[in-house]
Amino acid sequence: MIAAQLGIGAAAEYGIDSAHSSVTFSVRHMMVSNVKGSFKGLTGLVTYDPNNLPASSVQMTIDAATVNTNEPKRDAHLRSADFLETEKHPKLSFTSKQIRKNAAGVLELAGDLTIRGVTKPVVFTVDGPTPEVKGAGGRMVMGASATTKISRKEFGVLYNRMMEAGGVVVGDEVTISLDVELVRK
């Protein structure tokens, strides 16, 4: 009865609450540590039907120029043509192609990620979604987290320098994590 009252188990459309959502990334630096960063301005629309996952979909957009690693010179370099080239490619985007449960019952979000004008397929592993709860103003909200790993080189982000002792300054593998709060429309 409570599930039916909250609409749990029924198809619903949600907007991403940018103020309560985040996009973070992590990449190996000098082969010894991880540099972490984030983006602001995540927007999007999610249609979720737990009883009919093929009818579910996700569309997200991020403002590439908001990249922040807490180091202004590095952030400016990340916005340059060496990395994200934000003047030419102001948005990063993701459009789902399929939402499914894997053999272990974990939700997977497969779709197209576009970085720097290059689109490649990726699969996010999803933690959630949480059950809906009544939020501020009586609106129904739920949340989810998702993670994937990409090769930055596959997206045309090729910049690197060799280190004197061997190896490279910037790793190829980038971990991307999303934490989203969704507000039912």
Image: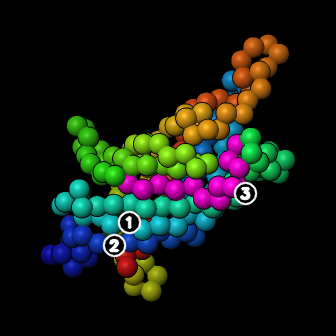
Mark 2 neighbour density, 10 Å: few (under 14) some (14–19) many (20 or more)? some
Say which amino acid is labelled 2. Answer: Glu
Q: Which image quarter is the N terminus in?
A: bottom left
For the residue marked with disc 1, what is the amino acid?
Val
User: Horizontal and vertical percent for residue 175?
Assistant: 55, 39
- Mark carried by residue 13: 2
Q: CA distance from mark 1 to mark 2?
A: 6 Å
Question: Looking at the image, which is closer to me, 43 or 132?
Answer: 43
Question: Which numbered disc, 3 or 2, marks the residue closer to the eye?
Answer: 3
Q: Earlier in the sequence, mark 1 or mark 2?
A: 2
State the image coordinates of residue 135 (x, y, percent, origin top left): 43, 78
Tell which circle, 3 or 2, labels the residue nearer the N-terminal end.
2
**Residue 46, numbered label:** 1
Q: Secondary structure at mark 2?
A: strand
Q: Residue furthest bottom?
A: 137
Where disc 1 sits, the SS reads strand
Whether the magenta-drawn stretch holds residue 31 is answered as no
- Residue denoted by label 3: 87
SS class of the residue under badge 3? Answer: loop
Q: Does residue 179 lie above or below 26 as drawn?
A: below
Q: Please determine whether, in this image, residue 133 is positioned above or below residue 129.
A: below
User: What residue do we see at 34% from left, 72% from top?
Assistant: 13
Which residue is located at x 72 percent, y 33 percent? 159
Distance CA(mark 3)–CA(mark 1): 28 Å
Question: Residues in magenta?
Answer: 83-96
